[in-house]
Amino acid sequence: MNDRNRHSDRNRPRQGGPGPEGFSDGRLVEVHSHIARDKQEPAQGFSMTPIFVVFLFCAFGFWAGLYLTRNSRGFSASAFDLDAPVASASVGPAVFEPDAAKGEKLYLANCAACHQPTGMGLPGAFPPLANSPWVAGDEKRIIKIILVGMAGEVEIAGAKYNGNMPNVGAALKDAQIAHIATYVRSAWGNAAEPVMDVSVAEVRKALGSRGQYSPKEILEAHPLGK
Amino acid sequence: MKNFRYLVLGALVATALPFTGLVVGSQAQLGSLGRAPAEEGGPLMPPLEPGQAVQGREVYLSLGCVSCHTQQVRPAGQGRDIAAGLGGRPSVARDYVLQPVVLLGDRRIGPDLANYGSRAKSESDVLAALRKPVHAPGLRFDADGKPDARVTALAAYLRSLRQDYSSPEAPLK
Amino acid sequence: MSRIDAPLRVPFTLLFGSAALWLTLASVFSLLAKVQLLPSGLGACEWFAHGRLEAAARNAFVYGWAGNALFALNLWLLSQLGRFEIRNGWMAAIGGLFWNLALTWCTVSVIVHGPGAYALLDFPAGAGPVLAVSFALAGLWPVVAYAKRPTGHNFAAQWFVVGASVAFLLAFVLAQVTVVWAPASGVVQAVAHSWYVRSVELLWLGGSALGFGYYFVSKVLARPLHAYYLASVAFWTYFLFAGWTAPAALIGSPVPLWVQSAGVVGCVMMLVPVLLIGLNLLGALSKEGGWSRAWNSTSLRFISLGLTSILASIVLAAWSSDRAVNAALRFTSFSEGQGVLLLYAGVTMCVFGASYAALPRVSGGRWPSAAAIHTHFWASLLGAVGTVVSAFAQVGGRSPDWAFVAAGSSALLLLGHLAFASNAFATLIGGGESPQSHPAHD
C-alpha cells in the first residue's frame, strides 16, 4: 500500500498476529470461530445483548403482523387505495352493488321452477315475468311479493292465473333478494332500476310477520304503472 | 452453518421466498384479470389500442421516455396526483391488462402521462409538446415542421393514454 | 505471491481489468446523461437521449463494473479464507469473457436501439441466457471455494459472499423468465422487476460488500468483531428480509395494497440486520481508536465509509417507506440519491477498499502511485457527496443550479475513476516485475 499506511503499521498493536495488514487469515477465522463456539459465555461475562435481540425481534414481528393486517384490506386483489371505502367483503359499512349475474343464479335456484328460466311462466298455472308491468315500476311491489308471497286471481296480458306463491323470500338474505329483483327487472325485456339491499331490509321490517298478499291488496298499495 | 449445503440452500430459499410471496402471489390474484365494464352492460375497459399507438409505444420505449415520465396516478391519500389534476381516479391494475410491458416508471422529471390523452386537446397540442428542446433527441421534424412517421406514431400513442373511464375497482367520481 | 494467489492471476487480471474499463465507461455515460439534463442539453442525436445514456450507464456500472469486480474479488476473498487453490481457472476467464461480450452487445443495443421498460433488465432478450451462463462460469467460484475449502474455516464473510453469489443467479433467472421470456400479467411485471432490482442491490452487491466489511474490519484492525456471535443472526435476517423490501418502491402504484404493505414491513424489518451488522462492524470500528486506524489504512478507509453508507441507506429506505413520507418523496430525485448512496457510496467504496488490498497480493506488485490513490479517494468521496446532496436537494423540485452540481460531481467521479483505473492497470500488469516488493505473509 502507500507510504502512509506502512508508517502507521509500525504503531499498530500486534495482539492479533504477524503481518503488516493486521490479522492473518488463519488467525482471523480462528478467533471468530472461538467466539461463535462459546457464544453462551461471552468472554466479558454475562451479556444482555442476546436477550435484547430476542425482545427486539418479537417487537418487530408483532408490529409487522399488526401493520400487515391493518394495511392490506384482507389481501384483496382489488384494493389499491387505503382511503377508499372498505369493500363489502370486509367489516365495516358494506357497499352493496346489485349484481344481475348473481341474481340470475339465485333466480334459477329459487324461482325458475314455477316462472321458468325464460321468465315466461306456465300458461294457466304460473304468471310470466317477462315484459310484465308487475315487476317494473315501484320496487316495493316485487320485494313484497318475493318476501311474503301472493295468493288469488290475477289477470296478466289477457290470461288469468289463480296462483298461490309461497313466501320464497323469507329464507333469503336481503342482498340475495335485491340481486334477484335486479335480475328480473332487467331481463326478458324488462327495463327497471336495480334494487338495493337496504330497500329490501326496509320492506322486510315494515311487513313484520304478515302473510300472503292478495292481488287486490298489493295493487292498492302499489298500482301498476302505464 | 458448518454445513455447506445449509448455507447455499438457505440463501436460495431466502432469495426465492419474497419472489414466491410477492410475484407468484400477485400473479395468482391478478393473472386472470381482464377487461371489464364499469357497470352492467357498459363497454369493456380499458379500450383496445389503435394500431398506430402500438407502434408508438415502441418509439416511447426505444427513446427511454420512461426514465423521466411515469404512467400512474396515486390515490388521493397518497400524494397530490389527483389534486394536481393528473387524473380523476387512482390507477388500478386493470388499466394495464392490455399492455405488453407496463411503463409505470419511477421518476417524474417530466409530467405523469397516464392521462395525457385526455389532457391533450388535439394532435397539434401533442406535437407542440414533442417539439420542445428537451424532447429533441430522437424526434425528427422536417424543415416546415412536419413530423416523421415515428413522431406521428408516438403522438398517437400519447393520445391513447387515458384512464378517464370508471373502473370496477376505482369508480370515477 | 503465495500458492493461493498465483493460479488466480490470469482470471483475476482479466476480470478486474474489464471491471476498471467498465467503471470508466459507466462514468462517461453517467456524465453525458447528467449533461443532457442541463438547460443547454447535448444536442439532438438520438443516441444521446437521456433515457438511453442513463440505461447504458446503469448497466455498465452494475453488470460491467460491480459484476466483474465481484467475480474477481469474491473469488480472491474466499480462496484466501478457505485456503482454496483454484484449478480450472480458465473457466472463470471464459465466463468473464462471455459476460463482457454480452454486456458490450447490450450496451451497443441500448445506445443504438434504445432500452426496454425495466431498469437492469433493459437489454436484448437474447443476452439474458448468455449472461446467466457466463455468471455460472465466472461468478459461482466463491461457492466452489467454500465447498472445497480444505481447512473447514468458517467465517461470516464467507456466508455473505456465497449467499450473494447464489442469490444473484437465482434472481436473474427468475426475473428473466417472469419479465422478459414469459411476461407476467400487467402490473405483476412491475412487482417482479422491483424484486429483481432489490435482490441485485441488496443481496448480490450489498451482500458481497458486507462480506468485504466483515473480513477487512477485523483483519486490518487485528481485533475480533464486536458481538460476533450475533453474526449468523445478522446474516440470516439480512438475507431473509432483503427481498421483501422490493414493493416499497411501488407504494401508491396500481399493485394490490397487501403487496405495498409487505414492502413497508420488509423495509422496517431490515432494521434488525442493520442493527446487528452495525453492532458487529461499526462496534469493532468504534473501539480504541478504530476509526482513526481505519482512516490510515487505504483499504479500510474506503470500506468503513462504504459500510456506513450501506447501513445509512437501508435506514433511509425504512424511513421513506412510511406512507406519509413516501407520498412526498415518491417520483422525486430522492430515489436517485438513495441509489447512489447504496450502490456508489456504499458498495463501490467497499469494492475499492477490497481491491486496494487484493490487487497487490494477486499480481505480486504494489500500487505504483500514492498520488493517484489520494486523487481517487478524494474525487470519488466528493463526487459521491455532490451527487447525493444534489439529488436530495432537488426533492422539492428540479433546479438548473443543482443539475450543474450533479454534472460537476459526475465529472469529479470520472476523474477519480480514471486515476483508479490507470493505477489498477499498472498494478495488475506491472506487478509481476517486482515480486519482492510486497512480502507474502500467512
Image: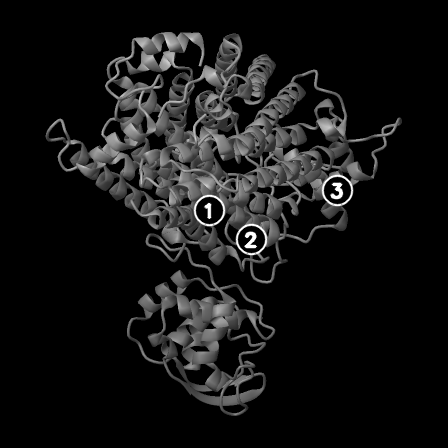
Q: Position of residue C260 (x, y in %)?
A: 43, 43
Q: Position of residue C76 (x, y in %)?
A: 45, 32
Q: Which mark is residue C311?
A: none
Q: Which mark is residue B156?
A: 3
**Label 3–label 2 contact, CB within 8 A:** no
Instruction: Report in which chain the residue with disc 2 lies.
Output: C
Q: Which residue is mark 2?
A: C184
Instruction: Report in which chain the residue with disc 3 lies.
Output: B
Alpha carbon distance from label 3 to label 1: 29 Å
Circle 2: is it few (<14), some (14-19), or many (20+) Cα within 10 Å?
Answer: many
Q: Amino acid at mark 2?
A: Ala
Q: Are marks 3 and 1 on the same chain?
A: no
Instruction: Answer yes or no: is residue A83 visible.
Output: no
The answer to whether residue A86 is above or below residue C425 is: below
Q: How is the image coloured?
A: one colour
Q: Amino acid at mark 1?
A: Phe
Residue farthest toward the right in the current orientation of the protein: B144
Q: Dot 2: what SS?
A: loop
Q: Quadrant of the C terminus of chain C?
A: top left
Q: Which residue is mark 1?
A: A80
Q: Amino acid at mark 3?
A: Ala
**Which residue sits at x=28%, y=35%?**
C231
Q: Dot 1: what SS?
A: loop
The answer to whether residue C182 is above or below residue C406 is: below
